[in-house]
Structures are given as structure tokens and as C-alpha cells.
Amino acid sequence: MKLQSAYIYFVNGSTAQSATIEDVKAKFTRYMDMTAKTGQQLGWSYQEAAFPYTIEERPEGKESWFLLNGKDPSMYKSIVVGVGSANEDGTEKHYIQISLPEAATNGDMNKANEYCRYLARDYKAELHLFNKRVQYFQPRKP
């Protein structure tokens, strides 16, 4: 398995037109807080199951990407999360890229899909999944 990537594109109707790496980390922090509160209501540590990673920044990726390292290496290895932009038809299109390295497990793939949907839904963006399917979360005109 080679490096696979999913993209969350900011489009017309999105809650933002771009995101910094700090914005994305804040979304993951919010996700961890929400799952911790859910776990308190349910009476078990749901946060550990919902977010089995630690956020790790590397000096070479400062301001452009960070790493989600699995807490249990037998089930979860790592996911790379980055931000960027591409010039398309003369306009700059901003995106969030979520990538799975070669050593990624099926658990990483499932969690990456879950986090992609969470971010795309939160930003009301267009999601291009690992399997090349597209999901639209932006509001559409009737």
C-alpha cells in the first residue's frame, strides 16, 4: 500500500475559505473534548476509543503538517494531517490533506475516514475520500 490521501476542499458555502494548521489542531482538540464528555455521560472512557492518537509536531512540518501517532502500535500506527493550496482555473483553492503512510493499519484508515467526515462537516466543505468518492457537506441552493 502506497501513501494514500483524502482532501477536504474549501468551497463556496464553506464556513471558512482556508485553514491554518493551528485551526485544524483546534478542531481535533474540540473533537477530543466532545468525546470525553460523551464518555462521561456513558460512564466509560469513550475518548480513548474515539481518538487513540497523540498529536505530534515535527520541526520539518512546522506550519504545514502534524502527525497523529497511535497510542497502541498494534492497532494504530499514524496519520499525517496537513494544509495547503492549489491553483485551479486561476483561483487558489485551499484544502486540508489527510494522508496514510505505507505502514498504516486498517484501524488508521477507518479513523482517518471518520476524522475527514468530521472536519468536512464542521467546515461545510467538499470531501474527496481515499477511494476517490466525493461527499458534499456545503449548503446547496434548491
Image (spheres, rainbow, N blue to C red):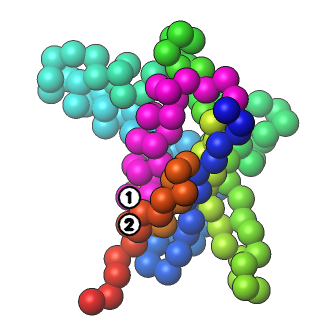
N-terminal of the two: label 1 or label 2? 1
Q: Which residues are magenta?
A: 102-121
Helix, strand or loop: magenta stretch: helix
Dividing the image into 4 quarters, which one contains the N terminus? top right
Which residue in the structure is indicated by mark 1? 121
Q: Is residue 132 left or right of residue 51?
A: right
The magenta stretch spans residue 77: no
User: Circle 2 sits in a helix, a strand or a loop, which is it?
Assistant: loop
> Under tag 1, what secondary structure?
helix
Residue 110, image x, y percentages: 44, 34
Residue 128 pos. (x, y %): 53, 59
- Crowding at dot 2, Cα within 10 Å, few <14 / some 14-19 / many 20+, comes out as some
Residue type at the position of mark 2: Phe
Q: Residue at x 39, y 72 (%)?
A: 138
Disc assigned to residue 137: 2
Measure how far apart labels 1 and 2 are at the Cα level.
Answer: 6 Å
Q: Nearer the viewer, residue 56 or 79?
A: 79
Residue 47's mark?
A: none
The residue located at (36%, 28%) in the rendering is 50
Residue contact between numbered discs 1 and 2, judged by CB atoms under 8 Å: yes
Res 28 seen here: yes
Q: Is residue 69 above or below residue 7?
A: above
Q: Name which quarter of the figure residue 123 lies in.
A: bottom left
Residue 121 position within the rendered picture, expressed as x and y whole percent measured from the top left: 38, 58
Amino acid type at circle 1 is Arg
Q: Position of residue 76 (x, y in %)?
A: 53, 20
Packing grade of label 1 (10 A; few <14, some 14-19, many >=20) is some
On the question of residue 23 being in view, the answer is no
